[in-house]
Structure formats: structure tokens, C-alpha cells
Amino acid sequence: VQLQAFGGGLVQAGGSLRLSCVDSGRTFDTYVMSWFRQAPGKEREFVAAISWSGGSTWYADSVKGRITISRDNAMNTVYLQMNSLKSEDTAVYYCAARKSFSYSDYDDRLRYDYWGQGTEVTVSS
């Protein structure tokens, strides 16, 4: 698994961005995929996760209703559509992959096996 995230940039508050994360490997559909983010001076936090098939998704409370995770297994890509962006969404966003899944720890960054390099999102107010 080799993950590469892109799509970040500078956007005004209320605007939208779509992040993408591409896996150059051949087993993408065997991994649960997630997005995390890390703001300056803060710990990395969970944003969203999606199951192997894309049939189930999970979100942090802070982004529910504004952010949507999706995946295209044929393209080895996971997306993060971000709408109604706020200044507090400013962070470096990382995609991550894990083989196993648990309802109790899908938001635990320590349970993820592979990470992308991060893409920076800046929301100006």
C-alpha cells in the first residue's frame, strides 16, 4: 500500500474542497480507509472512515453534515468532499488504511497501518 493524498489548498470560509487519496497498490479494496487531520499544535484527529465496499461510513461529530467520504475501488481512490468549510477545518489532512475493523476503535489513529503524506487545507475567514 502506498497512499498519496492531494487536493488541498486555500479556500474561503463557506467554500468547498475535494481531497483525493490514491493507492498505488493492488489490494485497495481489502482496506478500510479513513481521513484524519492535524491542526497546528494539536494532535491528529479522526475525520471520517469508510468500509471496504463503501457501504458504511463513520464521521466525527464535528464534520457530520458537511463532509462526505467515498471511495472508488476501481480507481484505488478514496475521496473527502468538504462543504461549508470553517476556519477550524484548517489542518493537514491525511488518508490512512487498515486491514482490520472494529466499531470500538475505527477512530483510533494508532490502529491504522498505512498513511499518506498529507495535504494542507487552509480556510480563511
Image: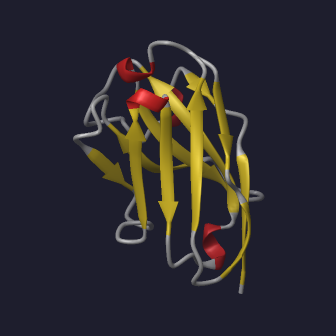
Could you tell whether 17 is left or right of 125 in the image? left
Could you tell whether 5 is left or right of 33 in the image? right
Locate the C terminus by quadrant.
bottom right
Residue 34 location in percent, x, y? 46, 40
71 and 105: which is toward the camera: 71
17 and 36: which is toward the camera: 17
Locate the N terminus by quadrant.
top right
Above or below for 85 versus 41: below
User: Among all residues in the image, which is located at the extreme top?
Assistant: 26
Above or below for 84 versus 21: below
Write the residue at 31% across / 26% down: 101
Could you tell whether 115 is left or right of 62 in the image? right
Residue 26 location in percent, x, y? 49, 12
Write the residue at 35% across / 40% down: 50
Residue 64 location in percent, x, y? 36, 66
Write the residue at 37% across / 37% down: 106
Above or below for 3 versus 67: above
How many numbered badges does the structure rendering display? 0
Residue 89 location in percent, x, y? 61, 68
Write the residue at 40% across / 58% down: 68
How is the protein colored in the picture? secondary structure
User: Among all residues in the image, which is located at the extreme front?
Assistant: 74
